[in-house]
Every structure is written in structure tokens, then in C-alpha cells.
Amino acid sequence: MHPTDFTLRGAIEALNEGLVTSVELTEAHLRAIEALNPRLNAFTTVTAEQALAQAKASDARRKEGIAGPLEGVPLAIKDLFCTAGVRTTAGSRILGNFIPPYESTVTANLLRDGAVFLGKVNLDEFAMGSSNTTSAFGPVENPWSRANDPDTRLVPGGSSGGSAAAVAARLALGATATDTGGSIRQPAAFCGIAGIKPTYGRCSRYGIVAFASSLDQAGPVARTVEDCAILLRSMAGFDPKDSTSAEVPVPDFAAACARGVKGLRIGVPKEYRLDGMPAEIEALWQQGLDWLRAEGAETVEISLPHTKYALPTYYIVAPAEASSNLARYDGVRFGLRVAEKGSDLKDLYERTRAAGFGAEVRRRIMIGTYVLSAGYYDAYYLKAQKVRALIKRDFDEAFGKVDAIVTPATPSAAFGMDEKQDDPVTMYLNDVFTVPANLAGLPGLAVPAGLDAQGLPLGLQVLGRAFDEETVFAVGTAIEKAAGFDALPRLRAGAV
Amino acid sequence: MTYTLEGRTGPWEIVVGLEVHAQVTSNAKLFSGAATEFGAAPNSQVSLVDAGFPGMLPVINRECVAQAVRTGLGLKAQVNLWSRFDRKNYFYADLPQGYQISQYAHPIIGTGAIEIELGDGTVKTIGITRLHLEQDAGKSLHDQHPTKSFIDLNRSGVALMEIVSEPDMRSPEEAGAYLSKLRQILRYLGTCDGNMDEGSMRADVNVSVRKPGEGYRTRCEVKNVNSIRFVMQAVEAEARRQIEVWEEGGTVEQETRLFDTGRGVTRSMRSKEDAHDYRYFPDPDLPPLVIEQSWVDQLKASLPELPDERRARYVAMGLTPYDAHVLTLEKETAAYFETVAKGRDAKVAANWVTGDLFAAINRLKTSIAAPPVPAEHLGQLLDLLADKTLSGTLAKTVFEAMIETGKSPGAIVQERGLRQVTDTGAIDRMVAQVLEANADKVAEYKAGKEKLFGFFVGQVMKAMQGKGNPALVNEAVKRALG
């Protein structure tokens, strides 16, 4: 078996049994990156030397009988996580050659558990996008392509497009990602892998470049649901450095994957049947529900009446927070500075921010500034907060009746790099199924469930109660097993 | 009698409200663990949070919250168990995050009151609108380099309490009295050191004027006034300016002004049209600040005695209201007095502290924080007076020696043999000698020149090197002159 073909769990077992070393695993992935990254553009920074040093150290630890839960496993890190001594870009020019002197809590937790970092992976600028085309480091290509149109390059989704593409193409066994409105689940679905946005507060936000603080949440992407469960256990945990992180125990998520769904009540929100949604997606959704019923679950139609307001609410709350969070990129203390000799402070701000931020980031800063402005605050921001509370209440009521909710992950399969680029609103519609979970702070998992007529992966989404990722993993695993998803992307390590 | 300023069109009243920014006494900043020491090297007390680095998050410092609650309790104000931090957004080079975290909509402390005492002895209550916690910005230094500005982030993130008064003050004197009283309360509580010259306390002064009997007219805000004297001057200067504007048929525009301490006038800083839109919204990095009533009760129970209570206690101890007032102005003075007075006659202790000690402090240009004699020594001196070891005159001599040498009064009495003579036999002998040597004056006295009595007493005291007990010497002279 080629070392890049392992699942994360399989790699851990192989390492434990001495069938492979971390150095061998790491070298194989570095070679795959070297071969495929020029095409995929998934990595912004490859830390080959550091990865090999970490792998060597890991093998040495293992020899001494010390092995963490992720001992020797090569991972990719979304370039939104600050990594000590390694350039962190957030996919933006404005951070310039920023090298943080500190490590994010999530990546520190992974290192504590023995992980090896292959490098930093590409993303939409400041995680703002659903196609990974807004990155200052160029777009990422989806390793999948349409069967009847293999030359059209597809987007991997976003914002964690680099994470999803790297894992799907077998350039890493798993990756960290973040999800503010669907940025884990949508690219996972587009790339035929699994990804979970855990409950808000489950993972610390310390050291993650902020987009929208009340929505941002870190999570893993990997090729199986169980691999996500293993990664999340290491990533999660209370952190006194993040006032919004939750002081709750971290369960053994992987153990929960095998629980089965017998007796579970699965909610099917009627408001998620969108006009104009491809029949294939509707069919896959029904198929998923059938699989769950076959495993002993009961499906229940539920209503989430405020769902239709979720997207507009999100596009007020997220830009509002972003407009404030991104004020610190001012050319004064770190990152890019564009200054004209003899000019003043205002000129420094204007030049630096105009040169440093791309069009989508500028658009969201302007929207956010507008909705918080005197005279507009009540009509937009305050109203959005009220609607957000109603959306949350919808879920609270639904979860009084059901244990999990299953929906499509995305309204379409991956689209072409030059499609949907003219109208930002069309692009925003990608997040229609994923955004409500962010607004309500609930866990959401995307699991690959089938292919469309073009041979592109489609995913289903499992939503759960706050801090009940275990049920989400159980339902996700049941779908995964029933789907028997074994299709492979055209671009992947070993295949080209 | 209402204070008014006379204009061409008649008398004008002044309306003043103060917003005081008081730096919270605490070892660490409001949302980071960085230190807060004054005068440290630039940018030496800055954490990554204070510098607004990517991914850095604020975490509330409980001690700063406790200090705000203590202050609220000291201001007899409502303590809000639920409060919230908002972001005040604006760009400036010394504001690293691009926003200030401040309790805009939901402050931790609600309405309260302060009693001020005025020169004529009247007491007036000034309402407190609110107190909220917020973080300070850094400092821009524009005079360090010909073309560059330097930024010092030491203050960035330091906890401030903004204490807002009602527009209840009607004169410069009242504004000054309010600020001194507020400062006094904060210093008693230990929640702000009140060092205005180090910037630990600054006031924004809101001033408007009106004809007697009118409602409020437009106010102007004079920013960042950093002494009590300047606040009083700024109130008067700004009021006079506004009166002139109104009387010349103009309209006072709401604006932010600065007080030019050199010229004693206020200047426009920015008008209402230039006012920032701060785009306040709840800080999503911080959950609402929820505190327990039991914790507030605990803080209340451990609150130190406040100036008003202490003053009342001193009066009950027998001090005059004036002495009680003077001794409680600074908590260091009160502490000094209490050490001296402990187990002794409070009135005598008060007289010595407000008399000889204050005189020595003034003469030596020192302060009660570095007193010329330790309180324990002054107490021992009072003991020597009480047991008649020393006369009042001798005690003053010993007090001066204590200042000079730093030694205890007991040691000085011992070394210099300054013990008061109360042996009537010895006094009688000395009186006899003096009268014999001044037989001519005795004759004059007996002929009716009674004011010579003092001369004889003086001569006896001189002969005894001041050590004779004055009362006994008096008696002995009277007896001898028959």
C-alpha cells in the first residue's frame, strides 16, 4: 500500500505496528506535494525540512515508547492558523511576510499529540469565499473533474479549499480548517471528503486569524468521518486564552462513530427543499434518509421557519465583525506597509489597505462598516441579531423532537473556476445549507455520499445539538458506510 | 446663593458635568497579563494582545472588575450583575486593534452620588450617571524625530474606569470640589492612585451656560484636563467664551475643545460634523460580564472606611469638623493621625498633626508620605507630655531635635537631660536666686509694675534651661512675690 493511500486511522495503526515510519509517511507526502502542488496550488508554504525533523523526532519518541494519539501523522495546516516561526498569510497580501512568534492553540494541541506539519494550505483571503478564488496566492484547483469535461478546472470550494484539495489529492492525511459560514463543510463536499465544524466554543480561536469572531470555529477535514473524529479530539478543549471557548470535557469522538443510529430520530427540515435545486441532490438526500431508516433510525419532518433569513443575516453579522476584526491590518506594526514619503497617517492606511486587501475582502469590510454605521445599525445589525436569535430558537425547538438533522451539504456540486464569479450573491448562495449552523453555534458534518451525473462528489450534512458531536459522528458514519463512497479524484498522489 | 457670571445682558449660570478617566490600580492590564508600571521604557509592557496581533484574544482580568465594583460601592452606586463590552471602532496609530473595548451600552456600575462640601460649609450632592470599564490606547510621540511619529504601547490595554457625573455642578468651585472628592474616594478605596500628573486621572469637562431659570443650552466638551486647578480654570474660561458667543447673537455649536493652560482659553479640536462614527457593537470575543451578588457582598464587606465615614468618626472622637476634614483629605494623613492618636488624647494628637507636623512638612517641602518624624515617634512625644516628663515648650524643642536627628523623643530626652523639673524645692530655690539677683525689679513690681511677673518667670525658666514645669514655676514665683 502506498503511504499516501492510508486513512489517518490506518496510518496510526501502521505506525503502531512498525509497518511504516513517520519519516517514510512524511517523505511520501512531501513527494506528492512536489508532484501535484504546482497544479493544485493547495499549499502556500511547504515546510519540508521542519516536517522531516518533526517526523524524525516522532520516530525517536515512538522508539522510546512515547506516542501521542497523532504520533507521526503528517497534516496540512490552513494558513489561517498562526504557526510559530512559519509564515502565516491568511491568503492575503496584507500580512506580507508575517511570521508569528506564537502558535495557535489548535495547532499547539496537534503538536502536543505528535502530529507532523507538512506546511500551510491555501484559502480564500481571510477565509472570505466559497471557491478559494479570492486568495492572494492564486486559486486552488479541485482534484476532481467532470467526466465529460475533464479540461474545465473546478473550484475546491472555500474558504478551506487548500485543506480539502490537499486531503482529497492525498497530499496530507488530514488538515485543519475553519468554518464561519460553511468553509469546512462546503469544500469537503466539493472534494469528496469529510469535514466537521464542531460546536462554537469546542476549539479555541486563540491564534487563528479572525474573520467573524462569533461564527468562526476550527475543525478538521479528512478522508473518513472517523479520521475527523480522531483529529477533532486532539484539536478541541477549553482554553483560558479564548473567553468564548467552552469549559466542557472532550469525549472520545472516534468511539462515538461506531454507535450506530438505531432508535435515533433524524429531522428533515422542509425549508431546505430549495426551488431549482438539482434533482440529483434531492435524490441523494432521500437516499441518505433511506439508508438511515434501514439502520433503524426514524426520520421526522421538522420546520426551521427562519432558515430563509439565515443567509441575509449571515451576510450582515459576518461582515460587521470582519470590518472591525480587520481594522488592525493598518501597516503600523506588522505585515504590509505602503507609504509615500512625506504623507500622513490617513494616506498610509489608505495605500496599505487598498494594496493589501483583495476585492472580496474590501467588499465585506464596506458592507460591515455600512451595517454598523449610525442610522443603519438598528435596521441591519440589530435586526440581524434578532433574527439570529430566532434561527437559534428554531433549532432549539427542533432538537426537542429530533437527535440530529440531515440536509444536503451544498446546493450544487463543484463548479468551474470561471463560473459564478460575476455576481457575489450567486456565490454567497453556496452557503445556504451551512450558514444556519454557524448562526446557531451548532456542530455540522459534511460526509461524501455519492456522485452526480458528471462524476463529481456530493455530500450530505449532519447537524446536531450543541456539544453533541458524538451523535453527529454516529449519523455521519452510518451514511458513510451505507454510501460506500470509494470514488477517487483524477488528480491524486500516485495516479499522475 | 447661585454662582453666576455677569455678562452684558445680565447674569449667566454655568452647568458642568464631568467624565473622569481613572486608571484602575492593578498589576495587569484589563484584557492581557502585561504589566502596568508607570514610567517604564517605551514598549516594554506590551503583550501580543495589546499590540493587536492576528488571532490574539482579550481575556478579562477579574481584579480590574473587582476594582470597578469597589469603586461603585464607594460611590454608593448600583452594581450591575450583567454588563457587556462593546467595540468602539476608529483608526489611530496608537490604537493597535483599530477599536477600543469599552462598556458603552451596558456599564458595570449605574447611578450613584457624591457629597461635596463647599467653602461656605454647605454640602451638595452630585449625581453619578455611570461608571464603566474600558481599555486605554497607546501614546503617539510626535516630537522624537523630524519626520516620524513614534508609538509607545505601554498604556495600550491598561484598564480605565470612566466615571460620568450628572450635569449637577454650577460653578468652577463645585467642579473642583467634585473632582477632589472623587479622587479622595478612589484613593481611599485603593482603586486608582489619583496621580493626575502621571495621567492616572484625566477629566473631560462638559460646560454649558444659561440664563437663570432656563433649561439646558448646547454644551461643549473640554477634553483631557489633567489637574483640579485646570478643571476649574477651564470651566470658567469655556463659560465666558460661550456667554460671549450667545451675547453677540451667535450660537454655541456642540464640539470638542482643548484647554490651553498657558493662555487660559479653550480652543476647538473638532466640530460635531467631524465627529467619528464609532460603529459600536458588542465585542464578539467577550461573553457578557456576569458577576455574582455574593461576590459583590464579599467586596462590600472588605471595603475600607471612606472619607465621609472617617470624618464623622473623628468628630465623634472630639475633633473639630475642620480638623476632621483636614485630617481625612489624604488617606495617608488620616493613617498618620490614627497612629499618633491610638490610645492617646485625640484632640492633642490632632493639634500636633495639623500644627507642628504640617508646619514642618511645609517648611521642609516634604509630604505626609515622607513625614519629617515617624508617627510612632510623635505618639511617644505625646506620651512624654501626658506624663509631664516634658512641658509644652520642652516638647517643641524635642520635636525639632527629632526632625534633625531622626531619633526617638525618649532617646533625645535621655541624651540631653531635657526632663522637666517638677521638684518644687528646686524650683523655689531657683526663684529665690532670681528674685535676689533682681532686687530692683522686685521693688518696681511691688510698686505696681505687675507686668514684670512674666519677666521673673522667664528668668527662672532660663536659669533652669527651660526644664522647669511652667505651671509650677508660675506658682512658685507668685508665692515668692507674695
Image (cartoon, coloured by chain):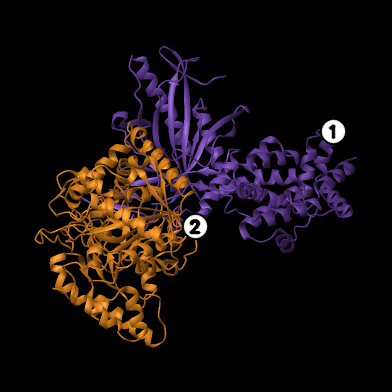
Chain colours: A orange, B purple
Mark 2 falls within which chain? B
Q: How many marks?
A: 2
Query: Considering only vertical position in the picture, is B128 above or below A65?
Result: above
Q: What residue type is labelled 2?
A: Asn
Is residue B137 visible to the viewer in this orientation of the structure?
no
Q: Classify residue B66 as left or right of residue A274.
A: right
Q: Is mark 1 on a helix, strand or loop?
A: loop
Report, in whole angstroms, how far the alpha carbon at label 1 lies from the one at label 2.
78 Å
- Crowd class of label 1 (few under 14; some 14 to 19; many from 20; radius 10 Å): few
- Whether residues under marks 1 and 2 lie with C-beta atoms below 8 angstroms apart, the answer is no
The residue closer to the viewer here, A53 or A18, is A18
Q: Which residue is drawn at 83% across and 43% down?
A: B474
Farthest top residue? Answer: B9
Q: Residue B202: in sight, yes or no?
A: yes
**Residue A96 horizontal/vertical position (percent):** 20, 59
Q: From this viewpoint, which residue is outermost toward the left? A: A151
State the image coordinates of residue A119 (x, y, percent, origin top left). Answer: 25, 70
Q: What label does residue B447 carry, if any? A: 1
Q: Do labels 1 and 2 share a chain?
A: yes
The answer to whether residue A469 is left or right of residue A52 is: right
Between A137 and A347, the one nearer to me in the picture: A137
Query: Which residue lies under the disc numbered 2?
Result: B27
Residue at 24 percent of width and 53 percent of height: A280
Residue A218 lies in quadrant:
bottom left
The amino acid sitting under disc 1 is Ala
Q: Mark 1 or mark 2, which is nearer to you?
A: 2
Seen from the viewer's position, the closer of residues A452 and A198 is A452
Residue nearer the viewer, B18 or A494:
A494
Q: Quadrant of the N terminus of chain B?
A: top right
Q: Tell me the quadrant of the picture where the C terminus of chain B can be found.
A: top right
Tag 2, which secondary structure?
loop
